[in-house]
Image (cartoon, rainbow, N blue to C red):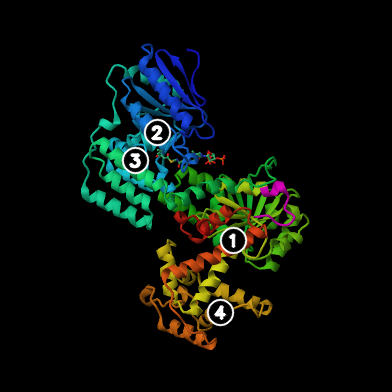
Amino acid sequence: MSEVTTFSATVSATTRDGVLVVTIDNAPVNATSANVRSGIDKALAHAETDPGIKSVVITGAGKTFIGGADINEFGKPAIDPPLPDVIGKIEALSKPVVAALNGAALGGGLELALSCHYRIASPSAQVGLPEVKLGIVPGAGGTQRLPRLIGIPAALDLIASGRIAKAGEALSLGIVDELAEDDLTATAIKAAQKLTATPPRRTGELPVAPADPAEIEKASAKILAKARGQKAPAEAVRLIASSHRPLAEGLADERTTFLALRDSREAAALRHIFFAEREASKVAGLENVETPPVTTLGICGLGLMGSGIAVAALGAGYSVIGLDQTQEAAEKGHERIIGLLERNLASGRLDQSGFDAQKSRLFVTASDADLAPCDLVIEAVFDDLAVKIDLFRRLDKVIRPDAILATNTSYLNPDEIAAATAHPERVLGLHFFSPAHVMRLLEVVRCEKTAPDVLATGLTVAKKLKKLPVVTGVTEGFIGNRIFSAYRREAEYLLEDGALPHEIDAALEDYGFPMGLFAVYDMAGLEIAWARRKRQAATRDPSERYVEIADRLCEAGRLGQKSGRGWYAYPDGKRTIDPEVTAIIETERAKKHITPRSFSKDEITRRMLQAMAAEGETLLVEGIAARPGDIDLVMINGYGFPAHKGGPMFVKN
Ligand code: 3H9
């Protein structure tokens, strides 16, 4: 092996038996930053001119091959050489180049690998072109080279969804040529030596396999319907579907499209979300806090919420002890959890051995004492203060003094629950969203006395559960429901001022919400919010504007879709505008002497967005939310706010 040759601060190489082994070492994810690009460029020139070098291997240091282009460089002045040029040089090199994928090859990383003449992956490697999730299309040949390698339908599936494929799938699709079971670099060197006997196989020179136009049409239509107005998936479809034209033409079109999208508001919004997600778990003061190991989770209350939490916990490898009030209720909970696991088995998300392993880690009981081995107990019982306090007092007697207690309350004050226990410092809130095994968002509530290691453990467990944790302080409804209340309030003001439920819903759906607010109410049922309003009636500030329309609906027995009527009527199950609702609204307006006026869709969304952002500002001032990005994450991942708009705080700027 030769001495190490350094091509740039992040790219170096050694020569082994005529093979130049180039390593990219640009922590944390080996993104193709400017000095990576210039380093590879120089390594290629060296390989081309040094007669002692017969072939090249490109690999990454650490656990990632290349995580993609450096997103931090987007929006800054361009630095030469551009990635497409470097990639073009790799493909054109007269000597064979092998990509040795030691880990994730994503975005520009996979595009670089596609331009190599052979690809070997370690079994832990993953590949993907997730650019659409950042509001862009691949900009360094991905939309043109991938179809040449795997055909248009498979490329459409990968690029337009942005999904990540594991090494096994990458092999069966033909994205990688070989999996290295042992030493990846040694296997890649052998392959590179063998390849010198034949002319390099250049992906860009391969023909695109003919595909059934009807199949392409069907796949494209499905992608566009799912995109809900986002630009990038549509552009990706267009570029992939036309990839049979000459490579240079396709690449030029792809580049122009990439640059235009990169500079769009949509892409800026999605980048904001990308970085906000990574920021969210960085909590001031927790940097050096050690967290105790957690292996056994207790879950109290095995209804829909508790069962969902149990499924997430079993999937993350925890042992679960589920508690319910009676043995019969506990057995029912067991059945519900197993039913959810069986669904995962049937859909292929879980194989038989995984199912058996998860089932063997589940135990249910009606006896508090059985929770003794738990490291963390999460309660998901009825949202009533007395019920929760009684439970926590009982738990106090059976769990270890260092075990953590978490409440899943949505609206109660967790400080009051904590105060009822012997160790309030070990209490925090873990506010899951329903269904808890599906929804990614988890509000981690820092109570007044929560100890730093308890909060840090909550974050660690959340990540292991594959959730997106966002820390919130204590306030009624935490971050999400506080903002949701403001949004709901504004919608009700709009109703009283002249807009109708379907007009508000249409404006929100046009903006990108999957469903309008009043349609969501009807789906969820109106009675819980009605009960809360009745509880709050005595303490409500009489000078505050209060809209009574929802109360009138509930009093008329219109409790939502379940009762066949709510904000809409549901003849034959189909949501329909109901003149009876319009009449109730008009009566309420008349009572307050309001002369209704009409609102445009833009005006409706503007007022709703302003209400959310104003409440968000208040949460920041009160110190309930640490960053605007945290608020955006909550609204996107828990309340259907369209991700490509960046969240209410991003929109405001
Ligand atoms: C692209 O490639 C465009 C091309 O088609 C065309 C070009 C011409 N850049 O996620 P983690 C940072 S677009 C800059 O927690 P993990 C991240 O912010 C790109 N920084 O790690 C974080 O920083 P910090 C297409 C990046 O191990 C740190 O790395 N590629 C980038 O859980 C750790 O991140 C993608 O969309 C980046 N590209 O997961 C892939 N990526 O520590 C995006 C990450 O300061 N990346 N950072 O908070 C990922 O999916 C994951 O980061 C990855 C590692 C799976 C790679």
Residue labelled 3 has its Cβ within 8 Å of some atom of ligand 1? yes
Q: Are the residues tagged 3 and 1 within 8 Å (C-beta)?
A: no
Tell whether 310 sits left or right of 270.
right
What distance separates the C-alpha of mark 1 from that of mark 4?
A: 22 Å
Crowding near pointer 3: few (<14 within 10 Å), some, many (20+)? some
Q: Judge whether residue 170 is colored magenta.
A: no
User: Dot 4 surroundings within 10 Å: few (below 14), some, or many (20 or more)?
Assistant: many
Answer whether residue 450 is magenta in the image: yes
Q: Residue at x 24, y 37 (%)?
A: 208
Q: Nearer the viewer, mark 3 or mark 1?
A: 3
Mark 4 or mark 3: whose residue is earlier in sequence: 3
Q: Amino acid at mark 4?
A: Val
Mark 2 CB near ligand 1 (8 Å cut): yes
Rounded to the nearest angstrom, the CA distance separating label 4 from label 3 is 53 Å
Binning the other alpha carbons within 10 Å of mark 2 as few (below 14), some (14 to 19) or many (20 upward) gives many
Contact (CB < 8 A) between labels 1 and 2? no
Q: Earlier in the sequence, mark 3 or mark 2?
A: 2
Mark toward the start of the polypeptide (4 vs 2): 2
Q: CA distance from mark 1 to mark 2?
A: 39 Å
Q: Which residue is mark 3?
A: 255
Q: Which numbered dot is residue 616?
A: 1
Task: Point out the stretch of residues depicted in magenta.
Answer: 445-455
| Residue 187 visible in the shown view | no
Using the numbered discs, state the Cα–Cα distance from disc 3 to disc 2 in whole angstroms: 11 Å
Q: CA distance from mark 4 to mark 2?
A: 57 Å
Q: Earlier in the sequence, mark 1 or mark 4?
A: 4
Q: Amino acid at mark 3?
A: Arg
Amino acid identity at mark 2:
Leu
In the picture of the structure, the residue carrying the numbered disc 4 is 547
